[in-house]
Amino acid sequence: QQQQQQQPTGALANPLLCVVDPSHPAWTALAASAKILARLPFPPGEIRSATVDDVRTFLRDMPSLGPAHPRVDRRPLADGALPAEKRQRLQSEAGPCWPDLSRELWVKILGFLGVVDRAAVAQTCRKLHQHTLDVRLWVSVNIDNLEGGPDALRALVQHDPQRLSIRWSLLRSEELAVVLSETTRLTSLDLTGCQMLANPAFVLQRPTIARLSALRVNFVPAFDDAALLAVTQYSDCLTELCIGGTSVSDTGLSTALPLLRRLEILDIYQSGWITDTGLAAVPCCSRLRALDARMTNVTPALLAILASSRRLQTIDLRDCYGIELETCETFGAAHGYRHVQRLLTR
C-alpha cells in the first residue's frame, strides 16, 4: 500500500501487487527448480508492483521449462514386457535387470519356494507368472496341512504333478476322488494322517492314477483290507506301500502281498492287527528290500520266514517286544547281517 501511495495516480493501467517471500512454504516448493528462479522478472524478496503484462510474459515462458512430470506411455505392452520407467528403476550397474534373467535361473530360484510362496510370486507381474508355470516346478507338490479345501487343491492339481503330498489334511473321500480324477501322470501319493477319508477304497479306484508307484496311507483309520485289495490293481508299478497305523489285518495282507510282486518297500509300523500270519507271504515279494515292522506283534518266527527273502536289506524291529536281542543276533550272524540290533540292517 505504501508503494501504491508513492506511485502517481494512473501510472499503471492494471496494477498487480506481487509479494515474493522466500520463507513462505508455497514459494519454497515453487523455487525448487533453478530454472524458475532464472525466469523471474524480479529478484526474490523484493516488494514491487508489476503489471499484468509482466505476469503474462512470465507465464508464457513457463511451458519452456518442461512439464513437472514426464508423460507416461499408456500403450499396451507385450507379454512379459516392463515399462521403460520401471526397467530403468530396476536396472543395476552391477548386472542386467532381474526380469531379464534366464528361465533356467528362475526355475532354480523358484524351486526353493513352497507352493504358497510360489503362488504369491506368480501374482507380482506377467513375466514371473510365466516362469511359475514351468512344468519342472510342479513335478512334486507338497501341501501338507492344507487349509484352502478342495478348491485350493484342485487349482494346484491343474499343474498335473507327478508326486502329491496331502499329509494331515481334512479332505473327505468324495472331494479327494474328484481332485485325483483330474490328474494324468501321478506316480506318488502321500495321504498320511488324512483321518477324514471314510472310504479310501473309493478314492483309490481312479483310472487316472494307474501309474501309481508309491502310496503312503499311514494313520488313516479307515484304510482296511478292502482298500488294500483295491491297491492291488496297481501291482504292475507299485514299489512302495506304507500302511502303518491302519486297520489292515492278516487276512488282507496275506491276500495282497502275493499280487504285489514288484513291491520293494513295505511299512507296517504300529499295525496292531498284523502278526506273523500276515507276513508269511513276504517271500512272495521277491524284490522286497526294506521292511518296517516297528511296534507290531511279530515273534521270532518271523525271522525264520524272512530268511528266504534274499534281496531283503533292511529289517526294522524296534519296539517289537516279542523278539529278544539275542534272537536278533543269532539271526544276523546266520544270515550275514552286519549290524545286529533290534534294528537289523544287512
Image (tube, rainbow, N blue to C red):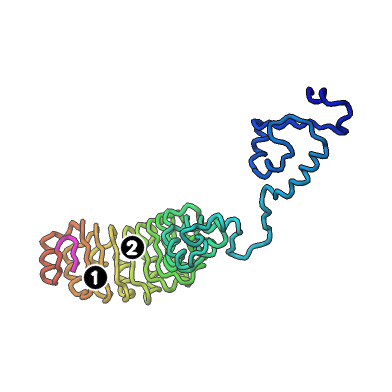
Quadrant location of the C terminus? bottom left
Three-letter code, disc 2:
Ile
Amino acid under disc 1? Ala
Going 84% across and 32% down the picture, which residue do you hit? 15
Q: Quadrant of residue 285?
A: bottom left
In this orientation, which residue lies closer to the viewer: 33 or 25?
A: 33
Q: How many marks?
A: 2
Query: Residue 194, located in which quarter of the rendered image?
Result: bottom left
The answer to whether residue 213 is magenta is no
| One can see residue 195 in this view | no
> Residue at 58% of width from left, 64% of height from top?
80
Q: Is residue 208 above or below residue 326?
A: below
Q: Residue 286 placed where, x, y %? A: 26, 76
> Badge 1 is on which residue?
280
- Point out the frontmost of discs 1 and 2: 2
Check disc 1: other Cα within 10 Å, few if <14, some if 14-19, many if 20+. Answer: some
Graded by Cα atoms within 10 Å as few (under 14), some (14 to 19) or many (20 or more), the crowding at tag 2 reads many
Q: Which residues are magenta?
A: 340-346
Q: Position of residue 121 (x, y in %)?
A: 51, 57
Q: Determine the image quadrant of residue 274.
A: bottom left
Residue at mark 2: 243
Is 272 placed left or right of 134 in the picture?
left
- Quarter of the picture holding the N terminus: top right
